[in-house]
Image: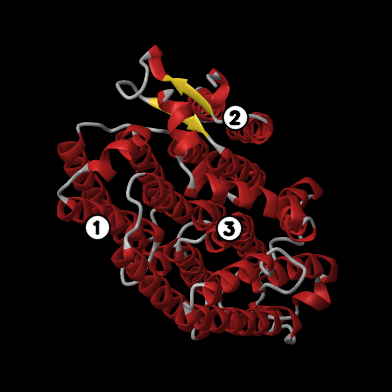
Amino acid sequence: MIDNQIIATVLVHLFIAILQLGFWRKTVPQRVLSIGGSFISLIFAIKLFTKVFNGDILIMHAANWEAPFGIVFVADLLSSTLVLLTAIAALAVSIFSATGIGRQRILYGYFPIFHFLVMGLNGAFLTGDIFNLYVFFEVIIISSFVLMTLGGRKAQLEGAVKYMAMNILASTFFLTGIGLLYGISGSLNMADLALIVPKIENRAIVDITATFFLIGFGIKSAIFPLYFWLPSSYHTPPSAVAAIFGGLLTKVGIYALFRVFTLIFIPNEFIRDLLLVLSILTILTGAFGALIKTNVRRLFSYLIVCHIGFMIGGLGMYSKLAILGAVFYLIHDIMVKTNLFLIAGLIRQMRGSMDMKKLGGLYAEYPKISLLIAIVLFSLAGIPPLSGFWPKIYLLQGAFENAHYLYAGALILGSFITLFVIAKFWSEVFWKKSPDPDTIEDKFKDLIGIRKIALILPICILAASSLYIGLNAEIIIQVADRISSEMLNTTPYIQAVLGK
């Protein structure tokens, strides 16, 4: 079904970014435009998700050039769900940024670049053309690099160099894979490629091409052994920037893996085994890395790596239950990881440090805020019946159903280490006695009411989203079940795009 409103969420962020350039030296209008634009985008995202959930796959042909000759935008349940989650996360980060980002960074273009980044994310989720996916990836990389370097501190620049170097390498593999794919198929439309690639007789060149995509998307997703750029860079930018990075940037790589390896390259036994091995190693390296970290954001960065392994393993098992669990975990993870870095920013406001050795006493001083944060931490750890618990059940069922016991063991071990790390974090930051008052730099206490709300409200929004996901798991399971069915049976997607 053709619907030109598919790209509304892309255009809203594009127009907001351009409009903010007219207020380059005025920070208050930029803050208001950012929050207002993110709210409008959320309305369009809800409308898009509702249309897709209650109807068919929606498409839009750019400039009326029909597929496979023109660029097509496609909204199926997977892409519309991710656009909705992106809209919620972007709204929360916009509100937090109104206080959490300093005036100087705003004057250097923080808000326009932020909206260009979100525009790129939405475009990547909605495009049905593999080269257009690359274009939106480049928009994301350029925007994220600028956001990471705003402020110009030495640690930021060092982290940005590692981030940019690895992402350029990922883009090189991605673009090389696109060149090979076009050479063997003569098409760039993903639905068209889904029909052409299985008929190619030279399976060796198909497997080589698939490997290029796996390496490119694997770097962007921070899969072992190419994950080290993430914990080396995500702790350096402001917390609002780290929140959108931690919640969404790695997940767009996961989305690309899900899309390409269920639509174009149906994984053979070698690719599935490779994905499972990589997922196990990613879980273990992320979990053990988190064990030894005392910096809050470095700890959270390693947990991102660990939990990416959970989702990659679901794709590697390539069964209905496993993919359902991976999709459910993706939905949960976007909300929780975005919130974790906002919480880290709030803690920095309250204590002036990210070092757990220098933190403590937050529960005694801010009991209500601490209980709010506890909800997020329990969701992350997978305490039943919160959002992190349910997808692990399906992933474990998928693992035992297909006799992938090593993955099941890694999943259980990763979950227990996550629980231990979060308990340690809670003890050090909230329950431990407050450090020497002379070392505390509490900027939060002196903020006016509206600024305090701007820091707390986003955490409330995302915590409420996580609670909804956990306490209404049957609804999320229904969505994830339909998404997994569409991923395993791509005929409706192909018919919607190509009309055949």
Q: Quadrant of the C terminus?
A: top left
Separation (CA) of disc 2 from disc 1: 32 Å
Query: Of the residues shown, which amino acid type is indicated by label 3?
Result: Leu
Separation of residues labelled 3 and 1 (CA atoms): 24 Å
Specify the amino acid type for callout 2. Answer: Asp
- Counting from the top left corner in percent of width and height, residue 422 is at 64, 78
Identify which residue is drawn at 41% across, 73% down.
Answer: 282
Q: Is residue 481 above or below residue 58?
A: below
From this viewpoint, is residue 151 visible? no
> Which residue in the structure is indicated by mark 1?
211
Element under disc 2: loop
SS category of the residue bearing label 1? helix
- What residue lies at 33% left-to-right and 32% top-to-bottom? 192
Sequence-earlier tag: 3 or 1: 1
The amino acid beneath tag 1 is Thr
Mark pair 2, 3: CA separation: 20 Å
Q: Looking at the rendered structure, which numbered label has been put on residue 227?
A: none
Residue 56, labelled with which disc? 2
Q: Earlier in the sequence, mark 2 or mark 3?
A: 2
Pick the front one: 150 or 162: 162
Snapshot colouring: secondary structure
Residue 384, how many percent across, how many down?
75, 72
Q: Are marks 3 and 1 in contact (CB under 8 Å)?
A: no
- How many tags in the picture? 3
* Residue where numbered disc 3 is placed: 324
